[in-house]
Amino acid sequence: MSDPDPSPKPDFIREIIADDLATGKHPTIITRFPPEPNGYLHIGHAKSICLNFGIALENAGIGAKCHLRFDDTNPEKEESEYVESIKADVRWLGFDWENDLYFASDYFEFFYECAVHLIKQGLAYVDQNSAEEIRAKRGNLTTPGTRSTGSDRPVEENLELLASMRAGAFKEGDCVLRARIDMASSNMNLRDPVLYRIMHAHHHNTGDAWCIYPMYDFAHPLEDALEHITHSLCTLEFENHRPLYDWFIENCPVPSKPRQIEFARLNLTYTVMSKRKLLQLVQEGLVGGWNDPRLPTISGLRRRGYPAPAIRDFCKRIGLTKFNSTTDVALLEFEVRDLLNREAPRRMAVLDPVRVVLENWSAETIGHIDVANHPQNPAAGERQVPISGEVWIEREDFMEDPPKKFYRLGPGRHVRLRGGHIIRCTSHEKDAAGNITLIGAEILPGTVGADSPAGIECRAAIHWVDVATGVDAEVRLYDRLFSVEDPDSAEGGFTSVLNPDSLKTITAKVEPALAVAAAGFSCQFERIGYFIADGIDHQPGAKPVFNRTVALRDSWGKQAGR
Ligand code: ATP
Ligand code: MG
């Protein structure tokens, strides 16, 4: 799993595309990513983005393109805030739609023309029955449905009714426009599906120009065809809708014939992915917003410190299939850890500090120690870390009565301060509760950058922060938002299985360089994990705030016995 650049296996979609190019069916390829602007994008969308934009990039030599199209046909749940966030997220993931940005709402007039066309062909009619009546007459898998009364009225009357619907003569629910297909079809989607419904709602793009809005199944193929999309890639739940997609392409006056191909959506353990559920978490204040670092949203993952290339590698790694499954979130965390291990510079921070007095170091002298920025990458250089007569070390790096194999600090024992001297513990103090409050130590002169002197056992180096120059920082220790693998199937609903420990905020001691780091600076806190200076709350030089991206090791894997 340590392959740094997992290349996509030729999947079934790329095979179809290669075939269509080889046979000359298409001179080039046009794909699209069609989000509905009713929420922020999540890692599932990243799979679709990497697929659609990825295919365009791979075929850039023959002019292939990927459109970003906002599928904004439902005025009730859509907002411009979402449009902007979606654009920012696609760009951040590393993709570019160039001049191909479209809004389905720009095609409203065309959808209407198609509806008129279908009526004229005898292939659509206005149904004035109530929603309940329509549902009751649809039949079920074993019983064919029956058409509503009035479904056989003449073309002219249907045209007039549709015009009145558009003109606002009806209330919501008074009537709908339906396609005339097959009320006995074994595919329920073909039993005279609804094309238009009445909604007296304000639309973010078209304002109050329309009070009838097209259904997804009607609008989507027409959008694809208008844009000359060659391959319309969608998730498996639309497989049963494909005959309907093809029916619209066949029967409407469209300029091209796109082909719909379905693939399995991404599901991840320990999270929920549907926008509806993410919205609920946000609205009920169970998380801090759409960009809460615990959410699987792109903006949350970005704030958490997940690098875009790690998300792209993850999407390549999981590949494409035709069956639904759930991917272990540990695989995503692995990609993040793997990339950061290679690329993130190292810094020192102490999360649970205890003070060490270096007895033979003059307290007033601030010295500097050159510490490597990346142990495996000399090109990353070194930085000077100040040190004076006292340092913070991690409480767990000292044991009063250590077992033999504990190679860190204990009475009379030696340890190296990362990049610096070997020190020997000479004393320690405790409070009434038995907690260590102070450690005394002496430095062994001449041990910086040198092997341990003969007769001294020093096998480990621990991280440390100078007391005089170190700075307090807020550190947010994020963990998985849910405590069970499949929150969607929790008996009490997904909000009943939130992980109470998904966020712990502590004050840590950090080396001075971290206090002035820019927002978005990402590094390894040596021996602890990967952290990023928060993109929103971190103020360099004034109020350092760091988010834990991922721990060095997968502690959940251990718990689960993996
Ligand atoms: P959700 O179910 O999370 O609300 P959606 O499908 O309603 O998502 P859209 O904005 O309609 O969200 O999706 C835009 C594109 O992203 C669609 O082509 C959709 O198939 C794809 N997509 C959405 N969720 C996933 C997922 N989990 N895995 C892969 N692709 C997805
Ligand atoms: Mg959708």
Image (cartoon, rainbow, N blue to C red):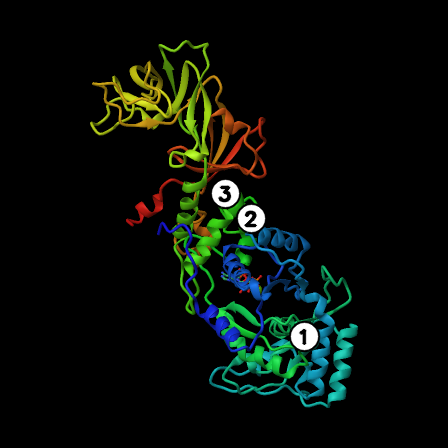
Residue 533 percent coordinates (x, y): 53, 36
- Comes first in the chain, label 3 or label 2: 2
Q: Residue beneath label 2, please?
A: 299
Mark 2 vs mark 1: give the one in front.
2
Identify the secondary structure beneath mark 3: loop
Task: Give the CA separation, mark 3 to mark 2.
Answer: 10 Å
**Residue appearing at x 52%, y 63% in the figure:** 55
In the rendered image, is residue 513 in sight?
Answer: yes
User: Where 185 falls versus 213 (above or below)?
Assistant: below
* Residue 553: % across, % down: 35, 42
Dot 2 alpha-carbon crowd within 10 angstroms: few under 14, some 14 to 19, many 20 or more: many
Task: Return the disc, 3 or 1, that comes first in the chain's sequence.
Answer: 1
Residue 387 left/right relative to 32: left
Element type at mark 1: strand
Tell which circle, 2 or 1, labels the residue nearer the N-terminal end.
Answer: 1
Residue that numbered label 3 is attached to:
305
How many residues crowd around disc 1 within 10 Å: few (fewer than 14), some, or many (20 or more)? many
